[in-house]
Image (cartoon, helix red, strand yellow):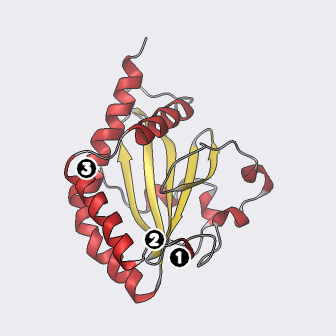
Amino acid sequence: MRLPESAHTDQPWRIHDIAPDFDIEDVWQFRMPGAGPDDFPTFLAALTESEQASEAPGLAGILFKIRWKLGEWFGWDDESTGTAHRVTSLRTRLPADLRDTELPTENKPLTPLYILPTEYAAEIANSTMHGVMHLGWTPDDTGYHLHMAVLVKPNGRLGRLYMALIKPFRYGIVYPAMTRRWERVWNDLAVRP
């Protein structure tokens, strides 16, 4: 379910101090029935394992393959456009306590920044933008839910055009598929003995 920006900005997330110059592109909530305050690390580990084990299925998977092929053809994802060259990694902005957090070993195409008991952030950079995927574990009167915020800093006109062009695909295909997949990961975890 798509949420207003305030669902992200009103939370006391550490990412606010790290990426204040990034625009909030999207905020989504994923249902986690029965989730408790301490379940985020377990869910995140299962999600990371699931993402590494398989590609995105269906139409969303096809869109990602097309995107990566276009990136290859046009050089959008060349190493020279990433955090080692075109932009500085947000890791350089992290305070010591966040730099020292234990990170997942692999999460391509995103590079993990930090992980806390209720918060995780990872970045990606290419010739179109510098982006952050932020995950947070948030309570309400029905329990705990996963919030995802996508923060971006478009790279010039190409980046702004790119973000505008992919928006309908994100909303109509990618995020609904991601919602089904991530909620399935939680439901599979919830039924384990």
Helix, strand, or loop for circle 1?
helix
Label 3 to label 2: alpha-carbon separation: 25 Å
Q: Which amino acid is tagged 2?
A: Asp
Mark 3 touches mark 2? (CB < 8 Å): no
| Label 2 residue SS | loop
Q: Position of residue 162 (x, y in %)?
A: 34, 77
CA–CA distance in space, label 1 to label 2? 6 Å
Look at mark 1 in the image and give the residue it sits on. 81
Image marks 1 and 2: residues in contact by CB distance under 8 Å: yes
Q: Tell me which amino acid carries mark 1.
A: Thr
Residue at image point 62% right, 76% down = 85
Place residue 168 in its image quadrant. Answer: bottom left
Give the mark toward the camera: 1 or 3: 1
Q: Which residue is the site of mark 3?
A: 176
Position of residue 49 relative to residue 57, above or below, is above
Q: Which of the pair 13/44 is nearer the observer?
A: 44
In this rendering, the answer to whether 52 lies above or below 16 is above
Looking at the rendering, which quadrant does residue 123 occupy?
Answer: bottom right
Q: Position of residue 39 (x, y in %)?
A: 52, 29
Instruction: Kindly identify the residue that appears in the image at 47 percent across and 35 percent down.
Output: 49
